Image: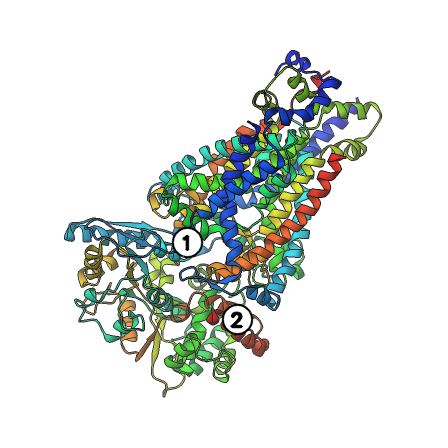
Amino acid sequence: MSSALTRRARTAGFHLVAGGLSVLWLLPIALVLLTSVRTFDDIAANGLGAVPRSATLAGFGQAWTDGGEARAMLNSLIVSVPTVLLSLALASAAAFALSRYRIPLRRAIILLMLAGNLLPPQILLVPVFKLTELMGFYDTLPADIVVQLGFGLGFYTFVLQGFMRSIPEEIQQAAVIDGASPTQIFVRIILPLARPALAALSALAFTWTFNDLLWAITVLRTESVMPVTPALLGLQGQFVSNWNVVAAGSVIAAIPTVAVFLRFQRHFISGLALGAVK
Amino acid sequence: MLLVFVLVPLAVEAFWVFWPALQGFYLALTDWDGVSAPRWVGLGNFAELFGDPIFRTSVLNTAIWLVLFGGVSAAGGLGLALLLLRERRGVGFYRAALFTPVVFSLVATALMWQVIYQPDGLANRLLGALGLTGWQHAWLANSSTALYAVLLPALWRQLGYVMVLYLAGLNGIDPVLYEAATLDGANRVQQFRNVTWPQLRSVNAVVLSVIVIDSLRSFDVVWAMTKGGPYHSSELLSTYMYATAFQSLRLGYASALAVVIFVLAFGVIVTYLVRAFREEAS
Amino acid sequence: MDNAVLSHWVTTEETRRALPDLARRAAPWLTRRRFLAGMGVAGSAAALAGCATSASSGPVTQSAGAISIQSNLSAPQAKASIEALAKGFSAQHGSPATVNTIASETFRTQLPSYLTSNQPPDLYTWYPGSLLNGYAKKGLLLDVDEAWQTMANYPAAFRTLSGDGAGKLIFVPTSYYWWGFFYRKSNFAKWGVTAPTSWSGLLELCRALQAKGVAPIGLGAGGNTPWVASSWFDYLNIRINGAQYHRQLLAGQSRFDDPRVAKVFEQWRTALPYFDQQGTALSFQEATTSLLQGRTGMMLIGTFFADAAPKDTIPDLDFFQFPVLDASVPLAEEGPTDGFFASSRTAHRADVLAWLKYVATAPAQELYIQNSSGTVLPTNPDARDSGTPLVAKGRAMLAAAKEVTQFFNRDSSDALQPTADAALVRFIQKPTELSSILTGWQAAAEKVFAS
């Protein structure tokens, strides 16, 4: 009897703590939402921190059409989806080879690939800009895809090899006995086993690529190919900004990434029945 | 075949990252304004660095940042992941709530945090309501509180991300090990110390490296909220580098700063990783 | 993966021992030496690819066609105005003009890469000053003398402003605005005070406002807008030491720890007690709200702040001139000017010059003002402004000035502006540390001028 009570108390306690944290966490987001439904005149007359005295959805319409956000979201998707797919494919291949096989210098290679991410990206902007001009696709979306691919590879490889390293040897060796080639082992065994890591990394990679600002403004300069984050910046004025429109635009821009996270999160969690290996 | 697995990603990274990085290192030895030809100054930039009071301030601030930001995001991320590990009703919403700051546009959220930190904003009003009027400050405008004030939104954006990494790692742990531990009579804390923590070793290597990288490269939040001000009190190495590159237009000096950041990050991570690799091999 | 399949891959001791051979079997020719050699080849191939510091050169083939304008006018009204201009140009001239609007900060950081790229945009919005002179010296800007041939009615001051200091004209100004102590007429009436005409009058006004519980002088030098504090420095300097000294100082020909600069701060110190306590914690947009709500009395700000005010409050706005401190100093005002410049490597020179001639005409400037918020002045003397009493007063004030300065970062450089922000905000918060502030400022400025 008492165990059921403690269980209920524990559940209540959990929801209290987790719920409280969530509310605290979402507070600034709630403020953004509040700002997005105010009018410009309300904000100008009463300040950003004041209790709203207006309610309108005009900000969303303005961000979507006048601000060009519709096109910017499309650009972001065109860049993010291939980037995430390609980078994770390449990174998992490299991570697989580097973590499961005794390739010479493998640890040095892992560190080298990670080192690529240790340099602040701001310093790479001008050389990368010149490189994209040289390659002939400056100011096109493929440039953004390729640059983000290159810059993310080192980090994703590093993360994935960390996860793949912890997969037990026995499973792989059993496949080797059966005569499986490395590619088959990679595709049929290691990739499925690395699903939590791949799902987590996909959600993160999608978020970063979708929200990226620095590479986009470096390799793109025409308004029509700008992805969503530079476009959001463009909603601000040179001096004065319509914060309600900026807030509305931010809410719209957050939807795809939150959706991706919600969709992918059960994969971080669906562990696999490693225990079935008996 | 295996070689292709490694060489293709390596080649892509070599072209788009290593080559520009080498140019960046070269630029650290020059004086360049981004437009005319660079002028060779050898180690002149580095000599200037060591005599630069703003550089010293930013190194100190970065060290503080590394400890506070790094420490709290590691411990906090792990704690949150442990809290929200088990599948139960509502946990998906909680996880999404904690991850939302990571995905939300920085422009809008930085603005809201500035509003919260305004002298008559939420933070001070809350402190006033709790009777702590002595603690009220102009958080972002006061040179002694600016750095610590920016820490909060930075953590707010980082914890969900670290939580996700730890969630994936914790889920890679064989549940059989926990069953065995429970059978042996271990309580929660003992299970954590003897099962979870050792099993997280390779994940820890990744997460801690990530945290060091992010701490040393922390730029977006600080820049958006204070631009390193007021008068350099919240200046980090990364913001100082950006200001030098894109405000003062001294790309050679900025590259030297970037090299310093790189060396610091590399030094910290390599020592840790080499040790971790060696432990694993044995 | 189902359990049956998994259990099939059960390990044996033999397999565990066979694992190290796997790498060798997969790629038997992979030895350490060959691996390193492969890396070396890949590396040098990459080394032959582009170099970051190279710039393209050589003559550009000309063609007629669409011109592109890279614009930083991202506020919705300004954007609409420049697009209206582009449409007007296309209708008149025949060839299309496309406007590319980028966020202002992005525009500023990317301007060097726009100008040095292989196919630069044809035209750019911006302001004249040392930045443009620097680019002109490197041959990146188009000589627009041909456009100036049609601008004979422009006052000489604009012509001087648009030169690169070496005789070439590189800029075409299209609008300008002014700075002043703005206040709300209804609030002043409510408090029973009037606009002052002297510094002592200003201080008296501040005391009267303070007695009413209002923070007399508003400031918005917090958040992301610390640069508004520079207007105080600029105005005090041109009032006390004159515009010529001010320009010399900002060009690096004088020192910031000079006693003449200290005099500026001593004068400023007399007004400091009346500054809004929250002045360095609010952005100027929020400070505008404070002004409109009556929490502060007045603010030294440029007319662009009117964009932050609700439409119905604009008729209630008025301003007074920064008081004259020394009648012997030639009267100077701050009148920042905006306009267009072009890349020297444009492929459509004829069309670019046609655009520049077009935007310098009175009808084009009137079209621009019609679509904008109405607080800017046209540079063409024959063009009509929006006609409100406020604008007429501003135009008269600038016309009466002997010298017009541009604002700190325009007269000096964007690189020097952060040094001013740090020094001035620190002075406002800690005025007793003046001497260390000035020595620090001089040291920081020297580094900027040296590069």
Q: In the picture, residue C133 is in which quadrant?
A: bottom left
Circle 2 Cα neighbour tier, 10 Å, few/some/many (<14 / 14–19 / ≥20): some
The reply to whether discs 2 and 1 touch (Cβ–Cβ < 8 Å) is no
Q: Nearer the viewer, residue C21 or C397?
A: C21
Residue C106's tag is 1
Dot 1 lies on which element?
Answer: helix
Asked if one can make out residue B117 in the rendered structure from this viewpoint, the answer is yes
Question: Of B245 and C10, which appears nearest the observer?
Answer: C10
Report the quarter where the N terminus of chain C lies: top right
Residue at disc 2, secondary structure:
helix
Provide residue C17's location: percent of width, then percent of height: 73, 22
Q: Position of residue A109 (x, y in %)?
A: 61, 39
Q: Position of residue C394 (x, y in %)?
A: 30, 71
Q: Is residue B113 placed above or below B6 in the rendered structure?
A: below
Q: Amino acid at mark 1?
A: Thr
Q: CA distance from mark 2 to mark 1?
A: 24 Å
In the image, is A109 to the left or to the right of C11? left
Q: Is residue C148 above or below residue C25?
A: below
Looking at the image, which residue is at 62% across and 30% down?
A: B91
Residue in the image at 61% along x and 51% along y:
B216
Task: From the viewer's perspective, tell me whether residue C103 is left or right of residue B88.
Answer: left
Q: Earlier in the sequence, mark 2 or mark 1?
A: 1
Q: Which numbered dot is residue C444? A: 2
Give the label, 2 or 1, closer to the camera: 2
Q: In the image, residue C451 lies at what x, y percent? A: 47, 68
User: Mark number for residue C358?
Assistant: none
